Amino acid sequence: MCGIVGYIGHREAYPVIIQGLERLEYRGYDSAGIALYDGDNLKVSKTKGKVEDLKSRVDKEITSSGSIGIGHTRWATHGVPNDINSHPHVSNSGNLVIIHNGIIENYDPLRQELINRGYTFSSDTDTEVLVNLIEDVKKNEDVRLGKAVQIALNQTIGAYAIAVFDKTKPNEIVVARLGSPLAIGVGDDEFFIASDATPFIEYTNNAIYLEDGEMAVVRSHKKLKIRKIKDDSLVDPYIQELQLNLEQIEKGGYDHFMIKEIYEQPDAITDTFRGRMLVDQGIVRMAGIDDNIEKFLNARRIIIVACGTSWHAGLVAEYIFEEFARIPVEVEYASEFRYRNPVIYKDDVVIAISQSGETADTMAAIKLAKKQGAFVFGVCNVVGSSISRETHAGAYTHAGPEIGVASTKAFTTQITILTLIALKLAKHKGELSNSEFRAYLQELERIPAKVTEALKCNEQAEHVAAQYKDAHNALYLGRGYNFPVALEGALKLKEISYIHAEGYPAAEMKHGPIALIDEQMPVVVIAMRKGHYEKVVSNIEEIKARSGKIIGIVTQGDKEVKKLADHVIEIPETLEPFTPLLATIPLQLLSYHIAVMLGKNVDQPRNLAKSVTVE
Ligand code: M6R
């Protein structure tokens, strides 16, 4: 998983590409590189580390960068992150240069064949094999670059989004995709290439998203032609007008994207139900559901597939769907689902949840479910993403760009949209009366204001963070709707502060984890007044009896937990099914402050990337 950027046109290529790479660093940040043709020479600079390391190296060297170039920010798959394995990779002749996001699975036999034909390799990457394969085809078949790319790709197995150009013909870039995203920004006599639209949004709102199995030869003064890689047939380019603006992808005065995104949640949740939830009329309107309502109403069961935080949102949805719509739900890790032999019925509805819409395991689970005849519905945030296009129908969360690697607003907006769907189905099935349905909508409409209120616990969360930042372990407990929130709280702490944390159903604690509790162990307990409150209070007593440090996440005005806990953070009251939308806020803030205090890279935690497009 990596970010790729390219430019061809009338501007200096370097600033466009380097800025684009900065915006794509969420996709990986092991190493970064750039290739520019300045009219005389091909300059390739690459380095282990982040885009800023590349920048500090290249800035000094660049006087004129020419108007064609490509750049890459890497999340290593083949070969350790070092300077040599960084992209771009240059062919043996020194003429062709490539960037690649994905994996060429049969790179080893291809590499052997090329070695037998005299090619040498300096890196351990599959990408260097690909660029030399293209060179070999070009030379032997005496074809133009576009054709050579096409022939070479038809010999590969795997996934890719690539951009490649030839320094001897620096008037075109050839791009192709299979399994990894690739967007082309269409300007006036200029084209931008990127893994998503953020690198070019200030230059153009017009974008083409290549479909899997498509390629294009991009020339600045010519119309774009898109072809199918397999059979060379022409495809009509579909130019979309994007609704993204620059402000949305910048930090806007916050220290980190994560905290900005935490604070964006009231607006993000509002944007999720805007135009869909018509409270006065007692209607939930969603095209993806309305057009397929029979599929949902006749579903034998709903299977939710997702990874990470999106999987946690799926677990919350399980409670919500079963409670409201009375449809049986199974929630599966996409990565497990795809590799076993799951029983999928034609009347199952599969819901795939993914912020990025690019997660490889979720994508594979979708393909499996489709193959077995199920109807697949996508819940994605990124518009035009691969998953949103692979599913039969879907709904966007409209949370706006989430840049911080730790998901925050994606989680709450996924829960919001899934709640809307569950309520809508419940109404159709007659499981909720009109007045019950309306009461739920009214409360959901109040949630953004309640999230704003919950965010006022920021200082308190910071205070608690200061006391536990040096802990080595933490336990997060919740019951019912808030068990998945406990899992999510633990994941947030792990991924950005590198403190080991476990989420557990509070009642399960006595079946094992209770052995971990001593005076060193912070235990975050979600103890909402609605739902199993007394039981959770008993669990808190058990922790207290073993000298654990208790951080209670409680409903405003709580009395019981206050007496027992070392700290309490209060959040507003709401209906039980909506408590995850509020209880998650202090947990996000707690982990954020701990990570900041520990001096960790909050937005780009080690070893992680925003979208995991490898298996
Ligand atoms: O883009 P997706 O929602 O499909 O991503 C799934 C996970 O990779 C993601 O939620 C990951 O767990 C986050 N880093 C959690 O904060």
Image (cartoon, grey):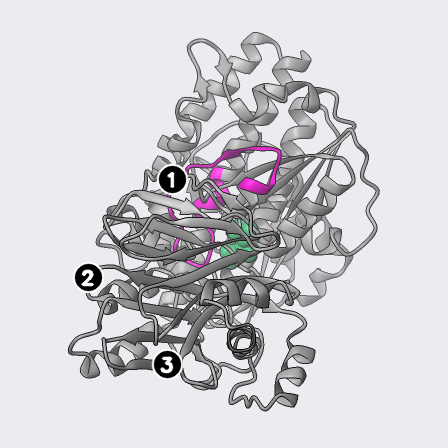
Residue located beneath label 1 in the image: 239
Residue at left 56%, top 88%? 119
Q: The residue under label 2 is which amino acid type?
A: Arg
Along the polypeptide, which appears first: circle 1 or circle 3?
A: 3
Q: Percent from the top left, x then y, of residue 279?
A: 44, 15
**CB of mark 2 near ligand 1 (< 8 Å):** no
Image position, residue 585 (x, y; %):
44, 46
Mark 1 touches mark 2? (CB < 8 Å): no
Q: Amino acid at mark 1?
A: Ile
- Mark 1 CB within 8 Å of ligand 1: no
Residues at marks 3 and 2, CA–CA distance in whole angstroms: 22 Å
Q: Nearer the viewer, mark 1 or mark 3?
A: 1
Q: Is residue 501 visible?
A: no
Residue 142 visible to the viewer: yes
Q: Residue 11 shows which numbered tag?
A: 2
Q: Disc 3 or 2, which lies upstream in sequence?
A: 2
